[in-house]
Structure formats: C-alpha cells, structure tokens
C-alpha cells in the first residue's frame, strides 16, 4: 500500500502498539469510507490457477477527480431509466436492485423490485408504482426475453396513469398524449397476438423517440440516450422478425451512432447493439460480418462485465452457431462450452430457456465432433 499521511480527509491509525500480533502483521486501521486505487495485480505463485495475489493499492483523496466522476456516473447509472431526478433514486434498495441488474443477477433484482412495489402499493405511492412496473418491464424484456410478463407490467404502469406529457414543448404535447394513450390501448387489448403487439409497439415507440428527441424541454443525458438506444434496438429487432431487413439495419445504425457519440466506448449497450447487428448479418447469411460484430461485443463484455454475466454466455452461444456455419467445429465447441459453463456459474436452472438452448448447442457440436472422430477411425 502507498499511504500519503498528508491526506487528512481519510483517518487511519497504526495498531503496532495495540495488536496481539505486533511483530508479524503490522496492522493499520482505516475508516469505513476509505477508497483505494487498484494498481498492479500479480500472482504470488507460478501456478496456472494461483490462489494468492499481490495487489498494489494507493490511498485516494476525497477530492480525487476520477473518484468524483465515477461516483457521479454510478449515481446516474443506478437511477430510474425514466427520470434521474425522482425521489425514488435516493432509496438504497432501489439502487441495489439496479446494481443487481447490471451484475446479471436478474432473479435477485426481481425479488427486490417486487418488495419495492409491494411497499409502494401499501403506501399508495403511485409514482413509485409506475417507475417500478417500468423497471420490471424493462428487466423482463431486455434481459429475460419474457415478453408476457414485460407486457403485464407495462399494462399496469399505464393503468395507473398516462405518463407526464409536459416533458416536451407545448406544440408536441398533444401528439405525445396521443402516443401514450394509444400505447395504453395496445397494452390493454387482449385480442392481439404477440407479433401484432410488437408491430404496434415498434411503430408507436418510433414516434415517441422522434417527439422526445425533437421537443424535449431538458438537455438529453446519458440515461435518456440509453433509453433511446434500447428503443431503436427493439424496433430493429421487430423489423428483423418482420423481414424488413433494410429498416432493421437503419434502426440499429441509429442506436450505434448515438452510442458512439454520447456514451463511453466500453458501454455494455454498445456490446448489446453489436449483438443485435450480428443477428441481422446472420439472417442475411453474412457470417463473417456477424462474427466480427460478436467479437467486438465480446471484447467489451470481457472488459466491463463479471466473468459469469449472462450476456457473456449469450455472446459465446451466438459465436458457436456462426463458427458451426463456417465449419470451424473446434471453435464452435469452445464457445458452446463457455456458454454452458457461464450459464451454470450464473446459477441458471436447467429448465431456464437460455440454459436449454446453450446445452442443446453444446450437445449438437459434441455429437458432430464424435461423428468426425468415428469417421477418422
């Protein structure tokens, strides 16, 4: 550790005269809010899987500019996707649930959101209810591909009330209210099937983005751009399902331009967008471009996500499929195995839809390898 004694804002004390292990441990007691900058990390053994590591730490100052930037980034990132100025953003339970989503701990996040929702319902806090229903809808649609539950939460959100149209200039409020009302009608219509639902929502969200970008009364910030990126990617995904490949390409390109202009180059949303574009290339049978997008996504994910994050499993799964198409079976096997291994580390149950498809892809590639070995024999 490097400790500058002139940093008076971080109290610490040597325990040499008080510790039972005076000669061996050289203990120092730091206050709870102490923050260190992590420097060099080196293994203490030459093993392939070392158990002990040496970490070089440097005590930071309370006025450290990078620490301020990191704290502000986390404050914004853990806020409501709809409004970073809401009182609910000060609730540590709310922030914990958002953090769990970032970590890929989706089931734990759902449990906490449901606790928040129960509390908001008991207290008749309609704004908190709306925001929590929205976060659950976002979680189920973006991260768990459970559109039925996502739709149910969106329906409950709009049943509480149409969102505030005063976020845009006067000349756009009537149009925004119409869009919100139409979305509510679509959500409440139990007669339309899933494809019709997605088609209607994609069209309405496209109008919503245009109104929001052109007439917003406040400057758009990182959370706003994240929201817009998610909407464009969803619209592109729907258009791809409809076979409108050129329109899907335009939507994903819009998301990509926003990410490159307004968000950091290692933002997880950029990796998600590359994954969407890879699926588009895959549909067009352009496997090399699809693989290139997946490699870009993987590089970002390996930098910013935990090793057991579900998004990593998804990227490895798609890479396995592309390598299989390119007849590179060894590569396909490696990525299929990684998808299964990460899925297990992420505590996915065997009946989880994603875990099932990872296991099916792994079994399929393993069978191909065994067939090839038998032919060689």
Image (cartoon, helix red, strand yellow):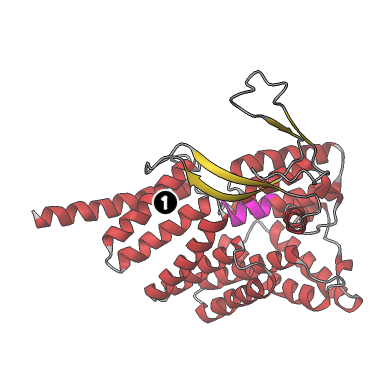
Asked where in the image residue 225 lies, by quadrant, the reply is bottom right
Residue 51: % across, % down: 45, 36
Q: Which SS does the magenta portion mostly show?
A: helix
Please say whether residue 137 is one of the residues in the magenta stretch.
yes
Residue that appears at 41% across and 40% down: 45
Asked where in the image residue 206 lies, by quadrant, the reply is bottom right
In-front residue for pair 119/288: 288
Residue 118: % across, % down: 77, 37
Q: Which residue position is annotated with label 1?
A: 339
Q: Residue furthest top?
A: 20
In-front residue for pair 149/57: 57
Q: Is residue 204 visible?
A: yes
Callout 1: helix, strand or loop? helix
Residue 178: % across, % down: 81, 70
Please say whether residue 191 is one of the residues in the magenta stretch.
no
Residue that appears at 37% across and 41% down: 47
How packed mark 1 is, by other alpha carbons closer than 10 Å (few <14, some 14-19, many 20 or more), is many
């Amino acid at each position: 550790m490097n400790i500058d004694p002139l940093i008076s804002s971080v109290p610490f004390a040597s325990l040499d005269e008080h510790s039972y292990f005076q000669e061996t441990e050289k203990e120092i007691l730091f206050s709870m809010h102490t923050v260190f900058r992590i420097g060099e990390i080196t293994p203490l053994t030459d093993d392939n899987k070392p158990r002990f590591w040496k970490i070089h730490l440097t005590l930071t100052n309370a006025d450290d500019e990078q620490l301020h930037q990191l704290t502000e980034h986390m404050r914004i990132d853990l806020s409501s996707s709809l409004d970073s100025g809401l009182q609910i953003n000060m609730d540590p339970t709310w922030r914990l649930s958002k953090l769990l989503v970032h970590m890929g701990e989706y089931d734990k996040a759902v449990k906490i959101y449901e606790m928040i929702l129960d509390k908001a319902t008991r207290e008749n806090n309609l704004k908190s209810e709306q925001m929590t229903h929205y976060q659950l809808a976002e979680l189920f649609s973006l991260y768990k591909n459970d559109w039925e539950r996502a739709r149910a939460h969106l329906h409950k959100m709009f049943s509480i009330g149409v969102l505030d149209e005063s976020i845009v200039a006067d000349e756009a409020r009537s149009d925004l209210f119409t869009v919100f009302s139409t979305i509510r009608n679509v959500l409440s219509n139990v007669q339309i099937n899933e494809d019709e639902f997605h088609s209607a929502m994609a069209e309405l969200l496209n109008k919503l983005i245009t109104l929001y970008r052109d007439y917003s009364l406040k400057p758009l910030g990182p959370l706003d751009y994240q929201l817009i990126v998610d909407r464009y990617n969803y619209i592109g995904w729907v258009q791809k399902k409809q076979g409108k490949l050129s329109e899907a390409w335009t939507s994903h390109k819009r998301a990509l331009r926003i990410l490159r202009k307004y968000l950091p180059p290692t933002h997880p949303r950029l990796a998600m967008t590359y994954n969407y574009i890879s699926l588009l290339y895959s549909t067009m049978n352009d496997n090399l471009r699809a693989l290139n997008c997946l490699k870009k996504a993987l590089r970002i994910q390996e930098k910013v996500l935990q090793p057991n994050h579900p998004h990593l499993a998804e990227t490895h799964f798609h890479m396995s499929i592309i390598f299989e198409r390119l007849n590179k079976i060894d590569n396909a096997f490696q990525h299929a195995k990684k998808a299964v291994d990460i899925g297990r580390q992420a505590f996915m149950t065997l009946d989880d839809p994603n875990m099932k498809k990872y296991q099916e892809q792994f079994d399929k590639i393993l069978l191909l390898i065994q067939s090839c070995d038998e032919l060689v024999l």
